[in-house]
Image (tube, rainbow, N blue to C red):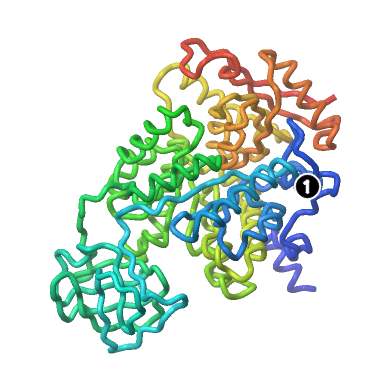
């Protein structure tokens, strides 16, 4: 008992693990499993609010990669807090991609969830090698292997088939081939034609579709094959995603801002501007053009796995923090991805270092954290999500108690006066909300811009963003601390406030005496580029 008391004095936020954390899903009321009602809060946020109150609402969004292991588990993942379902079009076939996407849409339409759909393109810059088998193969020390681009139907021992004909261009005898960022390493002993004969110097597992990088004297061998960022397969995948109603496209191996602008122009010509483009930062080229890429995109994914193939591992933490900070300054949502809970692909509990890794991403105020193989092919997708959620909630609680958001640097984003007014209003609103300890922030918005500016300041109270645009609701699903709701809005802020309070009181989400800071967005009834701005902040007490 004395030890417990001493621990509590040093760590006042230390609590015992709760049963809800072990369950892996919130208690969704049975009455919620009906068709989603316009204006209703998504059932997960509603359950969180009922259980934990306003300040207990989780701010960090959770992204799950959908794969063969979790298509049937999608309802459980949705109940566990999944806000975005990511479908990696590099793997699997159209049938299960389609089945997964349609199941997500069914959950939204019939059971009251609000899960956005994201698809990943494969990209044409990736060097991938495959041994031809269904499972992993062990490369032993000293064993000799052939890396070839020749198409062979049969599986050959000690042979890796590379997906690009010119993969060995510029490679010299003595160079190293690193597999999947260090799973195994080979030294090039002979080069003949386009093929390489290599000796294993660091034994390890060779997975199907392993990623290659070439190193010389401790430095990455940089090569530009002149391939477009989007291959013919990528364009076909994008068309498939559009047909299935995706909300976001994650663009792989982005080299510069032009890659983003090109795809955005294509979508704009088809009146599909609501589909958001996330740039995956996973190469040296993307790091060299980082600010331009972030400014051109709608959001960023820090793909640490592929990034770690191209840069020394010890540089990843600093690069991650730099990207997260820059995204927040530029008001773009950022997802921290890859190997957060990698051990849970096989084991039901994570390492403590993995939990610390998740917590660090949350401490940096990333908008979202993502499961990759843990949910796509892992044995325990729902347990992995429960760990991700519990670690996020605990670090958020600590950051809030320590007022860590006060340490966030402020960066003026806008140039035009109307945009500067919007930015200042949201910065002031977030400060007021914290200083007055209000219960919640309400913002009324058509396109979600004011909600994003509020989120950028990382206020303590949750941000309830009301919109009459269904596409805006889905896009706001990745903003830190924002709970998007869809309902008809009028030009009167008073009418909107009364309508939303009545709705939320009927659900038991707010009660008399709750204090709400209300922000009105001028984009309700005029274009975003309007020269005059009518915006306001009010503090209201619920009657």
In the image, farthest residue toward the front: 153
Residue 64: % across, % down: 58, 55
In the image, farthest residue toward the top: 532
Looking at the image, residue 177 lies above or below residue 103? below
Q: Residue at x 42, y 50 (%)?
A: 121
> Which one is in front, 529 or 268?
268
Residue 82: % across, % down: 64, 52
Quarter of the image where the N terminus is located? bottom right
Q: Image quarter for residue 49?
A: top right
Q: Residue at x 76, y 43 (%)?
A: 46
Residue 175: % across, % down: 19, 73
Q: Is residue 322 visible?
A: no
What SS does tag 1 mark? helix
Residue to which mark 1 is pinned: 47
Q: Is residue 44 visible?
A: yes
Residue 309: % across, % down: 34, 64
Task: Report the side of 516 relative to 284 (left or right).
Answer: right
Q: Image quarter for residue 514?
A: top right
Q: Image quarter for residue 4?
A: bottom right
Q: Residue at x 56, y 70 (%)?
A: 345
Quarter of the image where the C terminus is located? top right
Task: Report the side of 405 relative to 319 (left or right).
Answer: right
> Which one is in front, 366 or 384?
384
């Amino acid at each position: 008992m004395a030890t417990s008391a001493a621990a509590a004095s040093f760590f006042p936020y230390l609590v015992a693990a709760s049963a809800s954390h072990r369950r892996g899903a919130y208690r969704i009321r049975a009455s919620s499993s009906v068709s989603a009602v316009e204006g209703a809060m998504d059932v997960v946020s509603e359950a969180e609010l009922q259980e934990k109150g306003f300040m207990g609402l989780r701010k960090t969004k959770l992204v799950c990669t959908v794969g063969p292991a979790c298509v049937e588990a999608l309802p459980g993942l949705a109940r566990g807090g999944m806000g975005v379902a990511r479908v990696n079009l590099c793997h699997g076939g159209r049938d299960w991609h389609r089945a997964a996407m349609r199941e997500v849409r069914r959950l939204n339409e019939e059971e009251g969830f609000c899960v956005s759909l994201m698809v990943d393109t494969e990209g044409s810059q990736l060097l991938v090698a495959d041994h031809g088998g269904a499972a992993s193969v062990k490369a032993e020390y000293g064993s000799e292997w052939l890396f070839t681009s020749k198409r062979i139907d049969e599986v050959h021992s000690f042979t890796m088939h590379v997906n690009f004909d010119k993969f060995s261009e510029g490679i010299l005898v003595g160079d190293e081939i690193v597999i999947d960022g260090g799973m195994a390493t080979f030294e090039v002993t002979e080069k003949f034609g386009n093929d390489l004969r290599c000796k294993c110097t660091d034994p390890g597992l060779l997975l199907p579709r392993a990623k290659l990088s070439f190193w010389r004297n401790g430095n990455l061998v940089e090569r530009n094959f002149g391939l477009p960022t989007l291959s013919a397969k990528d364009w076909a995948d994008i068309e498939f995603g559009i047909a299935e109603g995706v909300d976001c496209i994650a663009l792989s191996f982005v080299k510069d801002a032009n890659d983003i602008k090109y795809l955005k122009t294509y979508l704009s010509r088809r009146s599909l501007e609501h589909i958001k483009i996330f740039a995956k930062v996973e190469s040296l080229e993307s790091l060299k053009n980082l600010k331009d890429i972030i400014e051109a995109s709608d959001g960023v994914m820090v793909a640490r796995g592929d990034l770690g193939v191209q840069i020394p591992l010890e540089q990843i933490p600093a690069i991650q923090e730099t990207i997260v900070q820059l995204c927040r300054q530029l008001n773009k949502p950022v997802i921290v991805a890859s190997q957060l809970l990698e051990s849970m692909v096989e084991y039901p509990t994570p390492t403590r270092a993995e939990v610390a890794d998740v917590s660090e991403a949350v401490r940096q105020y990333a908008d979202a954290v993502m499961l990759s193989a843990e949910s796509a092919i892992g044995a325990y997708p729902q347990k992995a999500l429960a760990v991700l959620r519990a670690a996020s909630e605990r670090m958020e609680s600590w950051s809030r108690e320590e007022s860590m958001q006060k340490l966030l640097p402020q960066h003026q984003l806008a140039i035009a006066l109307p945009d500067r007014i919007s930015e200042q209003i949201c910065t002031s609103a977030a400060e007021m909300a914290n200083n007055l300890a209000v219960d919640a922030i309400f913002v009324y918005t058509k396109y979600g811009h004011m909600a994003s500016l509020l989120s950028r300041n990382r206020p303590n109270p949750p941000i309830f963003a009301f919109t009459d645009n269904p596409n805006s609701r889905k896009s706001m699903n990745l903003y830190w601390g924002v709970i998007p709701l869809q309902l008809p809005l009028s030009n009167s802020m008073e009418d909107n406030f009364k309508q939303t309070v009545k709705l939320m009181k009927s659900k038991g989400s707010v009660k008399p005496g709750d204090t709400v800071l209300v922000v009105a967005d001028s984009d309700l009834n005029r274009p975003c580029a309007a020269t005059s701005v009518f915006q306001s902040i009010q503090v209201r007490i619920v009657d």
